[in-house]
Image (cartoon, rainbow, N blue to C red):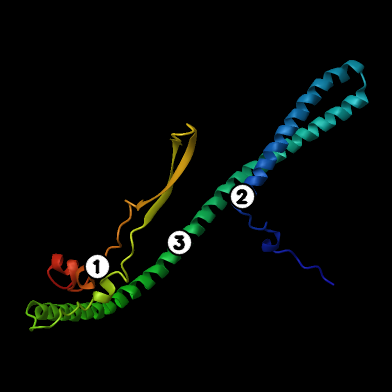
Amino acid sequence: MKKRRLTPIDNAEPVKSSQAIAAEITALDEAAAARADALAEMAAVRHDLLATGDIDQLQEHDTRGRRLALEGEVAAVRRAQLVVVLDEAQTAEEQGKRRAAYTAGELALSEGEALVSEYAKAAKVIADILARLAAAKATVAAANAALPEGAQPIPDPEHERSAPAEMMKPRKLTGVKRRWVEDEHTRKQAIVETPWTSDDPSWRQPAPTPSLVASVVLPGVSYGAAAIHRGGDA
């Protein structure tokens, strides 16, 4: 069976995140610090080895030191490479975020344009409803301004939504007042508790719901405050 030759893609390192690359750089820095401590300690020991005159032990000591120094050089080159790779990875990640945001913005544009078109149609329908409601209110008001003899005023078309469902009773505050009282015969004192109740001064009756005709504003169509300030259709 023939061995499959490795292609450049097979030899390429897997794509790492900037966090993984930064963690590798940190590990190299920690190893470099430990290596520097070890070399400093070996330098101190070497003086003692020279005094013993043991060539074999001194040679072994220097071999370990040279290896540590070589490991440091290799690690320094690797660190320099990783710094470049980290910058490229951070740039690629930032661009990826920006591309994702840009894509989301393009989708939002399409949705927004559709919503603007949908709003224009809905606003015209609502404006027509409110105009008819305003006419109905005006007709009711005109009738109430000159009621026939014995007739009751006609409720406003919005009376069911503009008034609270029911009048709420004011909230009450309750408590107990304690005071010392002296018995006039025995001269003994005792605590007397007197319950009390009062209206809550912070309580307010719910305000009526404002009229649709008076409060609704529909930008883009001839209805409401926007149309008044603009003087016509958008």
Residue at image position (79%, 23%) is 43
- Could you tell whether 83 is left or right of 232 in the image? right
In the rendered image, the vertical position of residue 219 relative to residue 89, given as above or below: below
Q: Nearer the viewer, mark 3 or mark 1?
A: 1
On residue 101, the disc is 3
Marks 3/1: CA–CA distance = 41 Å
Mark 3 neighbour density, 10 Å: few (under 14) some (14–19) many (20 or more)? few
For the C terminus, the image quarter is bottom left
Q: Earlier in the sequence, mark 2 or mark 1?
A: 2
- Residues at marks 2 and 3, CA–CA distance in whole angstroms: 21 Å
Instruction: Check disc 2 and report the residue beneath it.
Output: 19
Q: What's under tag 2, amino acid-wise?
A: Gln
Residue, far front: 185
| Residue drawn where x is 62% and y is 46% of the image | 22
Report which residue position mark 1 lands on. Answer: 210
Looking at the rendered structure, the secondary structure element under dot 3 is helix
User: Which image quadrant for residue 78?
Assistant: top right
Q: Is residue 128 above or below residue 234?
A: below
Amino acid type, mark 1: Pro
Frontmost residue, 153 versus 53: 153
Question: Which image quarter holds the N terminus?
Answer: bottom right
User: Is 31 situated left or right of 124 in this image?
Assistant: right
Viewer-side residue, 72 vs 192: 192
**Disc nearest the viewer among 2 and 1:** 1
Quadrant of res 225: bottom left
The image shows residue 45 at horizontal and vertical percentages of 83, 22
Question: Residue 129 location in percent, x, y?
Answer: 23, 80
